[in-house]
Amino acid sequence: QQQQQQQHHQQEQQWEWQKQGYAATLTAAVLMTGVMGMAPGAAEAAADVGRGKELFEMNCASCHAGGMNFVKESRTLQKEALQQYLGSVDQPVIQSFVMESRQHKNLVFFRMPGGKLTEPEYADVTTFIVDQATNNKW
């Protein structure tokens, strides 16, 4: 049990480090959008929620149906959980996490060409997740 507690503590510490890294990534993204003259949220607005829903159902729902997380039960896609574990419900933060996290990088999406999602597809999926979470649709 002590070993399990130690592993749990290490996982929590790793999540905290990731959360801090994503906050830095978000800050850089916001600064870049300002430099490039693009309004914050423009990329999110360009994403397709409907397509995101389709992609989510085909590729993500086996672990995250209804906004749940069947692998790490406390880390759901509910607004409160996203805020707690990622520090934000902003689409760029969630997309960065999904694209960069080891768990998701190692996944093979069998219904996708090459077994991976493209960056625009990740934008669609994460825009769908944000829409569901922020509007309490899960």
Image: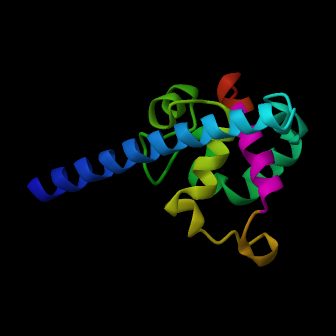
Identify which residue, 119 or 125, lies in the foreground.
119
One can see residue 120 in this view: yes
Q: Tell me the quarter of the image containing the N terminus.
A: bottom left
* Left or right of 136 on screen, residue 123: right
Residue 67, given in percent of the width and then of the height, sits at 60, 39
- Magenta region: 118-130
Q: Quadrant of residue 118?
A: bottom right
Q: Position of residue 39 (x, y in %)?
A: 84, 28
Q: Residue at x 46, y 36 (%)?
A: 85
Measuring from the top left, give residue 44's x and y in whole percent: 81, 36
Magenta region includes residue 81: no
> What is the chief secondary structure element of the magenta stretch?
helix
Q: Would you say residue 66 is visible in this rendering?
A: no
Q: Is residue 70 above or below residue 107?
A: above
Which residue is found at the position 78% from the left and 47% from the top? 123
Question: At x 46% / y 41%, what residue is drawn?
Answer: 19
